Structure formats: structure tokens, C-alpha cells
């Protein structure tokens, strides 16, 4: 049996993007979510850039190493992939919600922008690969759920306010819209916001409805948190469809508060997809039965960085790991040693447990999944899946 390094050497490096191809890169930094999308027309999109600062033993270490920050590594990765499209900027940056593992975590000794905010996560990527438009879940007023009082939230808001002051665009998400993100070439692809900031797409035009009851009815137990407000998207290219929902959750406190399950109505609005990013890193309060039933994805990507990612029950659902069923493909960007021990019974069915996970889609809807080594910047392939058709292709 070949050793992993020898297998990777035999598979070579990831071929560059080519026009007409959609690339979705789930970047393994080990410290949070970061997904870079290079559209078939060269449109560039970044969904989140986390920068948790806990580290081992409960969290995984930063990759490729600790010599640079997470924001710098993500910017370098995105710029490297975008070179084939002759791009050095982002068209769109989407902040699904305001938590450190999605937008960044500042420390006092981190570099600062001239405006005073700390460069971390998304704000650091913006300094290195400037974004034309930042789409945020609730800027500027964050109704109906204000941001919590925390350094990471204050820094995120300071960055967005500085952008606005400089005449750079920031918008809150328009749930239901398939036009807030516009391809550089009309009709090249479609990205629809199916959920976010406590709303869900109705399935009719660009209309949306509230998911949450009136704020006056919220109680200490029955109250949403930042994860509930996560932005959810469906990216379509021909028949191919991809879902990403940030940290959407489904926990109803054992049925006591049914409306706290925002995941299920949003994935029902999304409908069937080919590939999906696991909500909330596959944590115990997400990727519940409604998630896998509605999305029915053939492949799931778990953007993991903690010992609790993914939960065993969530992993079992995504794998469809019950006797007599055809298993689905699951890729984990980084499985912590403790998570490996907990999920050992299912790991033989998991396609990969570390590395960048790339979905490459052709104009006919056929796609292939790759995994590349996250220990350096060589883009060395460690896994290459078979070319498969979108299950949503018309007969």
C-alpha cells in the first residue's frame, strides 16, 4: 500500500482553473470556515474567513503553519487560484454571520488598518485582495438581533463602517434575491440567498418571510443567537447545485421551542443539491434529519476545526451510514484527533479527513471533487474523485 505522500506525488498538482469551469474551494486553515469560489466567467467570491485563536488541544493548529495569519493564508490561496483568471480582487465577500471562526478574531498586537480596526479574517483578506461588495447578514443596524458585545463583533463593525466611509460597498443580505450577486458575464451562473438574518426564501420570485416570532415573545430560553441568523446560499451552474448555510442550527431544546429550528425551513427552500457544506461544522445541533432529507446531496463537505466537529450523529446522517443504503461521500477539511477517536466507526466511509476540498464543475454540469494537501502551498492532490454528472440533469 502506497504511503500518502507517494500517492499525492502520483496524482500530481491541481490543474489551474479554465474559463467555463466553476471552482468551489473549501480552504483548510484549521481555524474556521473559508470558501473561495471562482466562477466560470472569472467572478470571484469569498464566503467567510475564520480565525479562531484557541489552538490545541481542543482545536486544530493553523495551516499551512503559524508563520502567517489565517487571513493572509486565505488571501494567498485565493490569489493563487485566481491567477488563471487574471484576477487580483474579489467581486464579492459574504460574511454569513459574526463569529470568530467565520469573520476573524482580533488580538491587540495584530496589524491594524490605517482606520484603526484590526486586520483579521475577512478584514485582512479585504486588505490583501480587495472586495468590491461585502454582503453581511445585518449591517448596519443588525435588526432583529443586535451583535453581541465582544471584541470580534466590534472589530467587524469597525471594518464595515470604515469601508462605507471610504465609499466602498457594504449591503445586508437580500434574502430571496438571485441578483444581489451578479456574474461578470450575464447568465454565467446564479447565486440565490435562500436564508439569512432570520428570514427564509418563499420559493416565489425574490420574496422572503420571517422565520422568527416577534421579539416581544422571546424569552431567556426561547431566543435566537448569532448562528440562527446565518446567511444560506444556493449556487447553480447549469444543472449543478451547491448549498452553503454558515452555522445554521436545528436544536429545538428537545422540542420545547420548535421555531429555533431555522435549518430545516431554509434547506427545504433550497431543495435538492449535488454538493453541500455542512451547517455549523456538522456540530450536534445542526445537520439534523431535515438537512439531509431536503438537500439529498451526493457529497458533503465538513469545514471542521474542533474536537466536536463533526458530531457522530451528524456524520452518520451525511454518510447515510445505515445498512442497506447507498453511502454518500463526506469530506472533512480537518479532523481533530479527539474527533477521530469519537467517529472511528464511520471513518472508513469518509473520503478524506484533512486538506482543501475542491469541487470543479464543467459547463455540462459534470463535476469532480479533489482534495489537496494543506500543509504547504503546492496544491498537491491527495484525492481525485471520479467525474460525475449532476443528478439534477434533465433526461
Image (tube, grey):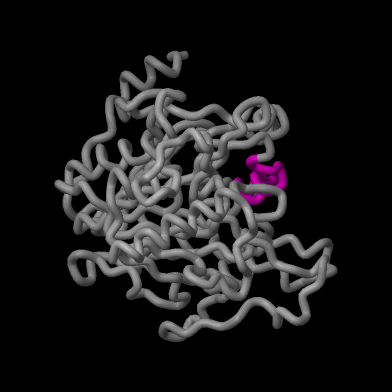
Give the residues drawn in magenta, as a range: 309-324
| Residue drawn at the location 49% of the way across and 81% of the way down | 203
Along the viewing direction, whichever of 272 and 82 lies nearer the viewer: 82
Residue 292 horizontal/vertical position (percent): 60, 58
Residue 340 horizontal/vertical position (percent): 65, 29
| Residue drawn at the location 42% of the way across and 54% of the way down | 47
On screen, 191 above or below 364? Answer: below
Residue 373 is drawn in which quadrant? top left
Q: Residue furthest left?
A: 86
Along the viewing direction, whichever of 267 and 318 lies nearer the viewer: 267
| Residue drawn at the location 31% of the way across and 20% of the way down | 10
| Residue drawn at the location 28% of the way across and 25% of the way down | 12
Please give left or right for residue 128 compared with residue 287 in the image.
Answer: left
Q: From where the camera sits, is residue 304 visible?
A: yes
Residue 256 is drawn in which quadrant? bottom right
On screen, 101 above or below 363? Answer: above
Residue 253 is drawn in which quadrant? bottom right
Please give left or right for residue 47 compared with residue 294 in the image.
Answer: left
Q: Is residue 132 magenta?
A: no
Quarter of the image for the C terminus: give it: bottom left
Q: From where the camera sits, is residue 330 visible?
A: no
Residue 129 horizontal/vertical position (percent): 28, 47
Please give left or right for residue 337 compared with residue 93 in the image.
Answer: right
Q: Is residue 317 magenta?
A: yes
Residue 313 horizontal/vertical position (percent): 72, 47
Total of numbered circles in the picture?
A: 0
Along the viewing direction, whichever of 254 and 108 lies nearer the viewer: 108
Along the viewing direction, whichever of 55 and 107 lies nearer the viewer: 107
On screen, 56 above or below 127? Answer: above
Amino acid at each position: 500500500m502506497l504511503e500518502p505522500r507517494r500517492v499525492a506525488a502520483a496524482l500530481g498538482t491541481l490543474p489551474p482553473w479554465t474559463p467555463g469551469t466553476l471552482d468551489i474551494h473549501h480552504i483548510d486553515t484549521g481555524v474556521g470556515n473559508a470558501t473561495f469560489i471562482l466562477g466560470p466567467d472569472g467572478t470571484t467570491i469569498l464566503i467567510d474567513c475564520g480565525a479562531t485563536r484557541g489552538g490545541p488541544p481542543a482545536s486544530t493548529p493553523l495551516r499551512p503553519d503559524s508563520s502567517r495569519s489565517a487571513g493572509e493564508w486565505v488571501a494567498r490561496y485565493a490569489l493563487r487560484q485566481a491567477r488563471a483568471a487574471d484576477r487580483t480582487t474579489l467581486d464579492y465577500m459574504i460574511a454569513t454571520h459574526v463569529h470568530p471562526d467565520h469573520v476573524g478574531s482580533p488580538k491587540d498586537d495584530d496589524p491594524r488598518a490605517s482606520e484603526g480596526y484590526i486586520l483579521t479574517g475577512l478584514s485582512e483578506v479585504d486588505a490583501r485582495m480587495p472586495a468590491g461588495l461585502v454582503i453581511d447578514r445585518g449591517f448596519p443596524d443588525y435588526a432583529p438581533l443586535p451583535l453581541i458585545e465582544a471584541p470580534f463583533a466590534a472589530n467587524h463593525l469597525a471594518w464595515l463602517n470604515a469601508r462605507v466611509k471610504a465609499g466602498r460597498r457594504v449591503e445586508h443580505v437580500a434574502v430571496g434575491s438571485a441578483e444581489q450577486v451578479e456574474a461578470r458575464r450575464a447568465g454565467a451562473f446564479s447565486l440565490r440567498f435562500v436564508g439569512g438574518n432570520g428570514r427564509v426564501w418563499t420559493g416565489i420570485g425574490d420574496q422572503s418571510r420571517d422565520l422568527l416570532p416577534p421579539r416581544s415573545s422571546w424569552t431567556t430560553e426561547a431566543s435566537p443567537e448569532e448562528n440562527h441568523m446565518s446567511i444560506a446560499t444556493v449556487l447553480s451552474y447549469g444543472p449543478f447545485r451547491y448549498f452553503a448555510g454558515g452555522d445554521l442550527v436545528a436544536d429545538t431544546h428537545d422540542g420545547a421551542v420548535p421555531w429555533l429550528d431555522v435549518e430545516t425551513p431554509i434547506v427545504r427552500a433550497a431543495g435538492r443539491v449535488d454538493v453541500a457544506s455542512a451547517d455549523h461544522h456538522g456540530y450536534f445541533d445542526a445537520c439534523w434529519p431535515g438537512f439531509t432529507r431536503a438537500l439529498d446531496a451526493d457529497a458533503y463537505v465538513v469545514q471542521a476545526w474542533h474536537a466536536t466537529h463533526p458530531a457522530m450523529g451528524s456524520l452518520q446522517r451525511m454518510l447515510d451510514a445505515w445498512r442497506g443504503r447507498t453511502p454518500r461521500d463526506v469530506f472533512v477539511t480537518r479532523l481533530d484527533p479527539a474527533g477521530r477517536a469519537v467517529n472511528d466507526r464511520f471513518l472508513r466511509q469518509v473520503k478524506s479527513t484533512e486538506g482543501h476540498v475542491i469541487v470543479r464543475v464543467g459547463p455540462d454540469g459534470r463535476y469532480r471533487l479533489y482534495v489537496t494537501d494543506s500543509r504547504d502551498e503546492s496544491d498537491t492532490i491527495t484525492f481525485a474523485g471520479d467525474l460525475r454528472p449532476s443528478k439534477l440533469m434533465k433526461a
